């Protein structure tokens, strides 16, 4: 499947199926997944996983307090970047109710992990991510492909202004360096979103965010000299952003974009715009199950350990229907994403000649 593909004018098979009384294509795979027991909660798995991440965080904080004003703290910063990445994946699973079936414990856990531990607004991210799931890779409806400093389509490139015009020309080369700012961008966007009408609990979320950064910066600048403190923050936030970007970028970047007016049923909308990443157990841990992106988009509340079995069922079903099902290695998926970024930035390079 070409990475520059744009889906346009596709008729929704779902409507055809409903009119003939056959039911939607998604209802059939949903039945198969349910019969396989893949939607049931996995409390033991999440207890072990969250305990492991909590212990890793405690170990990192202990090491930080023990080492004192030393350049060895940069190793702690790198380790904590990985821990923060795992916390981000935990917040993601909580938001999708993969851990708890009820809203209240899911929101409470999300606020603790996202706002208190990560310094990211749970409410803001939840709103943004829900819109992404509803319309993945839709040029006008998916906030993850909205033009900002990076453009995701040639149309966006032709309309780019200001810094986006310069960055768009070289965005493939700048993509990974820009990811080092993603952690800070999430926090900045979280504070900015506190004034949004869509924020349900701005006072609570704002208080938790302030508490996080008071402890974070207070501890770092109290224990370390200014130079070491600034370097610690740069290493920690930079690697944290790089980790998050490396987890989320392979899933949709370089897959077909959906233009306004295109009709796709739920099954095809999720499958055609998503990519699975192969790689075994280490990839599963590194990406927190998001390497099974197709299955996650079809069944967002499915617990992480069930995704591998769901993948087999989903790929076979897509083959039955003749629906393209994209799988790729981690390195190859990043190559595809970077190639896509270079291709869509071509109008900006041509305009500058």
Image (cartoon, grey):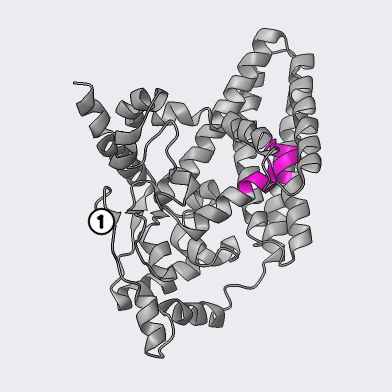
Residue drawn where x is 46% and y is 57% of the image:
135
Quick one: 313 or 341, which is closer to the camera? 341
Asked if residue 173 can be seen in this view, the reply is no
Helix, strand or loop at mark 1? loop
Residue that extends furthest to the bottom in the rendered view of this protein: 21
Q: Is residue 179 left or right of residue 111?
A: left
Total of numbered circles in the picture?
1
Is the C terminus in the top left, top right, bottom left or bottom right quadrant? Answer: top left
Q: Magenta residues, as a range? A: 113-125
- Percent across and percent down for residue 324 are 30, 65
Quadrant position of residue 352: top left
Asked which quadrant contains residue 69, the reply is top right
Q: Looking at the picture, how far across and down is residue 56, in whole percent?
A: 70, 40
Q: Residues within 10 Å of mark 1 (few under 14, many from 20)?
A: few
Pointer 1 residue = 1
**Quarter of the rendering occupied by the N terminus:** bottom left
Q: Is residue 122 magenta?
A: yes
The chief SS type of the magenta part is helix
Q: Is residue 9 left or right of residue 107?
A: left
Q: Residue at x 20, y 28 (%)?
A: 350
Q: Residue at x 79, y 21 (%)?
A: 218
Give the x, y percent position of residue 215. Answer: 79, 27
* Residue 345, placed above or below residue 112: above
Q: How far across and down, in percent of the image, does residue 88 sit?
A: 62, 44
Residue 116 visible in the snapshot: yes
């Amino acid at each position: 499947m070409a990475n520059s593909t744009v889906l346009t004018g596709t008729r929704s098979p779902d409507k055809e199926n409903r009119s003939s009384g056959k039911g939607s294509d998604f209802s059939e795979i949903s039945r198969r997944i349910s019969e396989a027991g893949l939607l049931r909660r996995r409390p033991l798995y999440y207890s072990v996983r969250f305990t492991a991440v909590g212990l890793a965080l405690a170990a990192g904080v202990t090491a930080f307090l023990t080492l004192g004003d030393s350049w060895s703290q940069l190793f702690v910063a790198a380790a904590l970047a990985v821990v923060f990445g795992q916390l981000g994946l935990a917040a993601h699973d909580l938001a999708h109710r993969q851990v708890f079936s009820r809203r209240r414990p899911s929101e409470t856990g999300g606020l603790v992990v996202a706002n208190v531990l990560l310094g990211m607004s749970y409410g803001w991210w939840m709103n943004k991510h829900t819109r992404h799931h509803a319309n993945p890779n839709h040029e006008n409806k998916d906030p993850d492909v909205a033009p900002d400093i990076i453009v995701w389509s040639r149309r966006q490139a032709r309309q780019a202004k200001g810094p986006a015009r310069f960055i768009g020309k070289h965005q493939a080369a700048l993509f990974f360096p820009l990811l080092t700012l993603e952690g800070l961008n999430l926090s900045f966007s979280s504070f900015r979103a506190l004034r949004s009408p869509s924020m349900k609990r701005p006072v609570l979320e704002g208080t938790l965010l302030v508490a996080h950064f008071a402890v974070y910066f207070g501890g770092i600048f109290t224990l370390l000299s200014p130079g070491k403190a600034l370097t610690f923050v740069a290493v920690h936030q930079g690697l944290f952003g790089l980790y998050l970007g490396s987890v989320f970028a392979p899933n949709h970047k370089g897959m077909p974009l959906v233009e306004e007016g295109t009709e796709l049923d739920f099954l095809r909308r999720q499958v055609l715009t998503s990519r699975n990443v192969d790689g075994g157990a280490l990839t599963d841990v590194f990406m927190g199950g998001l390497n099974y992106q197709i299955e996650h988009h079809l069944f967002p509340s499915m617990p992480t350990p069930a995704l591998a079995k769901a993948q087999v069922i989903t790929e076979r079903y897509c083959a039955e229907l003749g629906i393209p099902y994209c799988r790729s290695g981690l390195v190859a998926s990043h190559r595809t994403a970077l190639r896509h970024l270079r291709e869509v930035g071509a109008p900006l390079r041509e305009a500058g000649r």
